[in-house]
Every structure is written in C-alpha cells, then in structure tokens.
Image (spheres, rainbow, N blue to C red):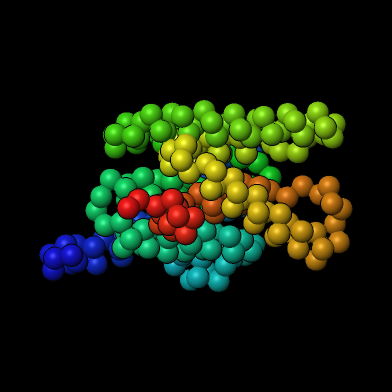
Amino acid sequence: MTGDMTSVVTALAPGCALLGLVFGSFANVLVHRLPRGESIVHPGSHCPACGHRLAWFENIPLLSWLALGGRCRACRARISARYPLLELGLGLVWGWLGWRFGWTPELVRALALSFWLWTLTWIDLETGLLPDALTLSGVALGVGLALWMGDWRASLIGAAAGYGVFWLVARLFLLVTGREGMGYGDFKLLAMLGAFLGWQALPFIIFLASASGAVIGALWLWATRESARAPIPFGPFLAAAGMVWLLWGRELLDWYLDSAGMGGA
C-alpha cells in the first residue's frame, strides 16, 4: 500500500467511526419505534417517560447520555444504557470496517449491512421481532448494491434461497413436531443476508448460526432454568454469522478447501 493510500485509509477509519455514532443514534430511533408501529420521523427525539422534546445538545451521540448521567434533564427518569451502547458499538464497527476495506465499493456494502444487522439484532433481543420494514428493505438494498457491484445473479439466488431454505426447514419441523420452530422474520433475515453476500455465503451462515445458537442457547437455558421450549431469538446468531462471512468468509473457505486438498494448484 502506498503512502498516499495509507493516509487515506488512516483518515477514513475515524471518519467512519464518527459517522457510525451518528447512524447509531438513528438506529436507536428505529429500535424504539419500529416494534411499536410509531413513525420514525414525527415526533422528534423525546424522553419516553415524560415526552420532553430533546434539545440539540441533549441529542449528541454518546456524549449527551454521559453528560446527563443517563437521566432525562426534565423528569430525571433513567435512560436505558442501550442508547450509548448501540451508538458506541456501531461507531467501533464502522471504524473497523473503514480500516479493513478502505474506500472501495465493498466498504459501502459492509457499512450498510452492518447497520441493518446491528439494528435488527437489538430489536430481536428486546422484542423477539424482526420488522419487515428492515428485513425487506435490506433485501432490496442488497440486490441494488449487487447490481452496482456486478454480482446481481448471486444476490438474487441468495435472497430466494435464503428464504426458501428456512421456509422448508420450518415446514418440516411443523409437520414433525406440530409446533412452530422459527419465525418468518428469520426467513427474511436470511434472505437479506443472501442478497448482500450471495448464495455462496448461506451454507456457512446457516452452519455457524445454528451451531453457536445451539451452544449459547443451551447454556442460557441451563443458567436461567427456563423451559427447553422458551423462545430464544435466532436473529442475532444469523447477524453475527453474516458479519463473520463478510469479514473472513473467503479466507475461511480457501482455508477449508486447502485443508481438504481441494484448493487450486
């Protein structure tokens, strides 16, 4: 990498991090309002407890929460730590992606996908929902970016296969057990991942998400003593597996093929 290119990437990473804090603030709006069916435009940012309309200095990502001590300035009600954690998390992820990809089309795709996955993860953890407004728009955006980047066939096949695979698994599970085992939001999330990452990513994502979900889910049920039928959100595991593929999927695939003796000469 030349000196000029190194300086561009060095400047890009903190710029992406700061932009991630701003988009993290918007993601907080989506996490709070979409599951409740509220408009994301009106009213403006306000305290959920008393309705106090936030001034601009109360709405600075991360800093305002810290300066106010995690409380509303008007009624002193506690403001969830989810707000700064979500903003900080997306800021760190976007800064890392800026450093990892540099100023390339892959960076645009990575920033968009991570925003959708980060937002959906928090919504699923809090409510058990994966709103169509995000999953279906994510499918459309993934296909649109694929058209721009020139791999639209893999994207369209990935979207269709992602939905179809989980739909088939869910139908078989219902026929065998007589109960639902997976929500339709998971189908649409996997379709979104297929649209962004192509059909080639789906086997890895399904395997990693299922394996990690089984282990962590079992540990969670053991620690909480809940029933084995207690619902555990699967969206965060799909999201994490998708990010692993985004960052290291090709390297992992090449390593597997080489270790299996199927790599190129």
Residue 8 shown left or right of residue 170 in the figure: left
Q: Is residue 260 above or below residue 187?
A: below
**Where is residue 249 shown, x and y percent of the image?**
44, 53
Taking the image as drawn, is residue 38 in sight? no
The residue positioned 64% from the left and 62% from the top of the image is 77
**Where is residue 149 shown, x and y percent of the image?**
29, 37
Of residues 42 and 142, the one nearer the viewer is 142
Taking the image as drawn, is residue 81 in sight? yes
The residue positioned 24% from the left and 53% from the top of the image is 103
**Where is residue 192 shown, x and y percent of the image?**
50, 37
Q: Quadrant of residue 92?
A: bottom left
The residue positioned 49% from the left and 55% from the top of the image is 260
Q: Is residue 118 above or below residue 84?
A: above
Counting labels gives 0
Q: Quadrant of residue 105?
A: top left
**Where is residue 54 shown, x and y percent of the image?**
49, 54
The residue positioned 29% from the left and 34% from the top of the image is 150
Of residues 5 and 19, the one nearer the viewer is 5
Of residues 227 and 69, the one nearer the viewer is 227
Q: Is residue 38 above or below residue 76?
A: above
Residue 93 shown left or right of residue 223 in the figure: left
Image quadrant for the N terminus? Answer: bottom left
